[in-house]
Image (cartoon, rainbow, N blue to C red):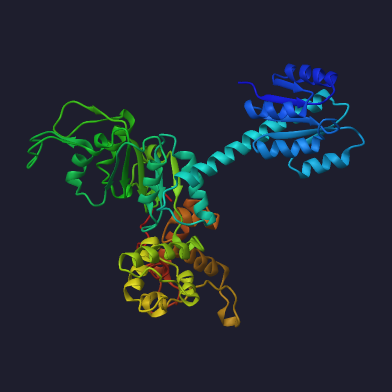
Amino acid sequence: MKETVLFVDDDADQCELIDATLSRQGFAVRTTTSASEALDILGREDVQVVLTDLGMDEMHGLDLCERILGARPDAVVIVVTGQGSMESAIAAMRAGAFDFLTKPIDPKHLALAVTRAMKHRQLSQEVKRLRETVSRERPDTLIGDSAAMRKVYDLLGRVSSSDASVLVHGETGTGKELIARAIHSMSPRKPKPFVAINCAAVPQTLLESELFGHARGAFTDAKQARQGLFVQANGGTLFLDEIGEMPIEMQPKLLRALQERTVRPVGESTEVPFDARLVVATNRDLESEVYERRFREDLYYPINVVRIDLPPLRERGADVLALATHFLERFGSSIGKKHLSIPVSVAERLTSYDWPGNVRELENCMERAVALSRFEQIAIDDLPEKIRAYRSDRFVVAADETTDIVPMDELERRYILRVLKLVRGNKSRAAQMLGLDRRTLYRKLERYENSEKHAPASSSRMDSPISQSMPSNAHPALPPLANS
């Protein structure tokens, strides 16, 4: 459909001129010499852009502009003024007009102004649509308005309507399954099943049967045929959690299923088609896993069409308090403590802690606090000991004594290991934060490890070694790399 432009001017000759000019540019044009008729047209027709003269007898163009924008906020208004009416034009712009033109109207300037107004309206409509989609369809389980989470919501709004495979990456406890469920609930597949499996929780010998199904008698205890999860999720979404834990022997079979869109149940000779969208999640650095040959590269790309990086809780700012309040209300209501609140002293402890267990740890913390609370406010004593006693660990470069000054290489080593600790051993993310390519970071880490191995036994640098710079849940030592 052509975009429609309405031109309002009590000069009939001017209306004919504008009609001819814009029609040659491919626009559908409506003209009128009456301001009241213009309002009637706007009430019954889909008009995108309105051009109105200011100096009209029936109604001043400024009043018409205000009435148009009051009745049709989505319309874009351009005012047309004579040389001596600039003050009125500026007043119309302040009232919401998008642009103004001066008489006599140059045809090139007219076409350019209308085209710009059309593009402005299209962009405004798209932004409005995306905001409404996110605010209307984002599940209540997703809480937080930090900049990091707004990026996640934006990706959810854009990817949910497609069938592209999605990789959700985030640390343990960040809520990756909630994101997968949000993708499903915001998609056209919402009425169909959402099927989830944790690849780390199923024994390797049973994983193929779980995913693809099996025939009766295919193995011991297979007393009847069973549909696999790919077929159970037909028309809906299949969520593979902890995809990084999938055995390497199983990965080619998954790759073939994704490529062919069929599965072969264990013990069957025929293949069964399926129509399920795939969402996978991992807390592992899959790029590093591919580099170290623990994850197949040819599988990594099909499951990583769109990647959503779920931020850890320590990077979500005030979301900590929003989530804490949510858990407080939920657990409080369940045991009859409906009026609990969080005082400033407790809020300070919650926001200063770095939450290595992420949202799951915060949830457990608030459940404990609710259970132990004796008053209408949560007390510091109601928090776990490690949160009460937590002191932020900072990397300090400044030195007050010459004996504290270290060589630049040593300073770099300390800083790199500190960044690696902050990102929980995720080497790809550390390389990105440090501005290094991954191979360079690997070589530096291998050098640090070798230096530690060959250091004298009596050496005891406080920040030494990778083993002390890595968190307790990360690998204690980096594996040797070939051809790095």
User: Does residue 464 lie above or below 265 as drawn?
Assistant: below
**Horizontal side of residue 459 vs 124, given as left or right:** left
Q: Please tell me which residue lies in front, 397 or 29.
A: 29
363 on left or right of 342 = left
Q: Which residue lies furthest to the right in this view?
A: 84
Residue 49 position in % (x across, y down) = 70, 30
**From what the image shows, is residue 66 above or below residue 421?**
above
Left or right side of 52 for 480? left
At x 38% / y 68%, what residue is drawn? 338
Is residue 482 visible to the viewer in this orientation of the structure?
no
- Residue 409 position in % (x across, y down): 54, 67
Instruction: Give the tally of numbered discs.
Output: 0
Rendered location of residue 5, percent (x, y): 71, 25
Note whether 102 is above or below 402 in the view shown.
Answer: above
The picture places residue 60, in percent across and down from the top left corner, at: 82, 35
Residue nearest the observer in this picture, 95 or 382: 95
The quarter of the picture where the N terminus appears is: top right
Q: Residue at x 38, y 80 (%)?
A: 381
Specify the quadrant of the image occupied by residue 269: top left
Q: Is residue 202 visible?
A: yes
Residues 439 and 158: in front is: 158
Residue occupying image coordinates x 25% and y 34%: 231
In the visual, does 106 lie left or right of 402? right
Out of 398 and 158, give the one closest to the viewer. Answer: 158
